[in-house]
Amino acid sequence: MNMCELIDKKKRGLELSTDEIYAMISGYTRGDIPDYQMSAMTMAICFQGMSKRETLDLTLAMRDSGSVLDLSSIDGIKSDKHSTGGVGDKTSLALLPLVSALGVKVAKMSGRGLGHTGGTIDKLESIPGFNTSLDTPRFIKQVKDIGFALTGQSMALAPADKKLYALRDVTATVDQLSLIASSIMSKKLASGADSIVLDVKCGSGAFMRGQEDAEALAAAMTEIGRSAGKSVRAYITDMDQPLGNAIGNAIEVKEAILTLKGKGPADFTELVYTLGEGMLTSAGITSDSETARILMEKAISSGSALDQLARFVRAQGGDDSFIYDENRLKISQYSTNICADEDGYVTGIDCDSAGLASLALGAGREKIGDEIDHGAGIMLHKKCGDEVLEGNSLATLYSSDEGKLKAAAERLKAAYHIGKEAPGKRSVIIKEVV
């Protein structure tokens, strides 16, 4: 294979064959193809695009560049969930214990956060003793024993994607539909689940700002998964304001626990129930969404969903007493409030600015390897549509470094938009992509 010829072929808008894509990905993973040639290829893809067949081949080639987790020893349908990320997105922390308490087998691999988008692994490490590094035998055994396990992403899974994403990140070639879809789905397919539910965010805090682009990404990922023999359901959900009220790590764990106690924010609870309907029906626990919701409501009211979260935390070395008393989770000692300057209604909260305020408090990483302050974060008291009076508290910010509060507060204050007219009601669920 001559890489220069392949670059030229794609530059002219021609399709690469299956063999050419596999040879290119395996060569790049081995180090036989240099970064400068692969960056030329990704730029050509950005300009010319890829066909559905090419996108599927690229996904499978990246999946096959490393290990593919074998979950066949676990009885039943194995399920997974993926979110494209956003501010305040703690969905896995409530959703996965809830559905696994009802019989869904969940084998989940999650990542750490970078920038202002938080990672599930970082959030769980707010719980003392929690172990996010499980080897494969222990991971599989835990799914068999309690129905749910979560671990950090393995370097052995889809190593081509990890290498290629790092290259795209520094060559302005991240935002191309086929490259995004294949990156996400190569890891999902390598993780071995039979059924995948996708939460594709749309709005100011999402990678896909416009609904049309979000729907296109959801459709592409759904088609890839189904072509690979998986059951896939995708939902477009709102990220034009932070999800729920909590932004951070420990503070988001607290909100997820409260949700499993039936005391969560309405938008977050609705998202958990909707994605849960998709997971329960796809796993064959029930055939319709109405029954699925009734089952989830009963699991929360009976306490079985909370017990499942505690069982999961205990199995992975964490102190499960924090689950039953969420106030034990450490929140940073320094705090400040931002308040409304006028009467009116909250008409918008810029997600990126809210996320960057959280990052400034120490709750996120600016680069890989940075330490994070698990207790830092933000609690929103007012969200879109809420009426406010001059002097009302809009949000409280927390940090272990008192010097970080002022700049973060100024950024968050600027994220709030107050108007005289109440905005129309909005739903966190925009649509299901079928």
Image (cartoon, grey):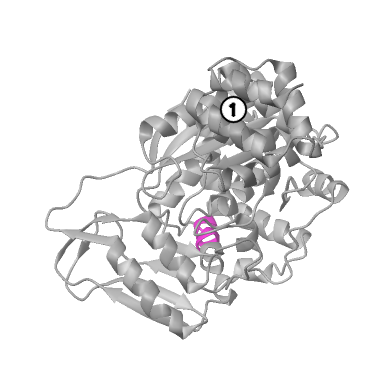
When the figure is inspected, residue 65 is found, relative to residue 226, above or below; the finding is below
Query: Which residue is pictured at 63% across the width and 50% down the height?
Result: 97
Please state which of residues 373 and 331 is positioned toward the viewer in this rendering. Answer: 373
**Which secondary structure, mark 1?**
strand
Q: Is residue 22 magenta?
A: no
Q: Amino acid at mark 1?
A: Val
Choose top left, top right, bottom left or bottom right for residue 71.
top right
The magenta span reads: 255-261
Residue identifier under label 1: 232
Is residue 160 shown to the viewer in this render?
yes
Query: Which residue is pictured at 33% across the width and 56% down the height?
Result: 350
When the figure is inspected, residue 393 is found, relative to residue 96, above or below; the finding is below
Badge 1: residue crowd in 10 Å (few <14, some 14–19, many ≥20)? many
Horizontally, residue 136 falls left or right of residue 22, namely right
Q: Tell me where residue 70 appears, x and y as whole percent.
A: 83, 34
Choose top left, top right, bottom left or bottom right for residue 374.
bottom right
Horizontally, residue 184 falls left or right of residue 107, namely left
Query: Which residue is pictured at 64% across the width and 19% down the height?
Result: 227
Is residue 289 shown to the viewer in this render?
no
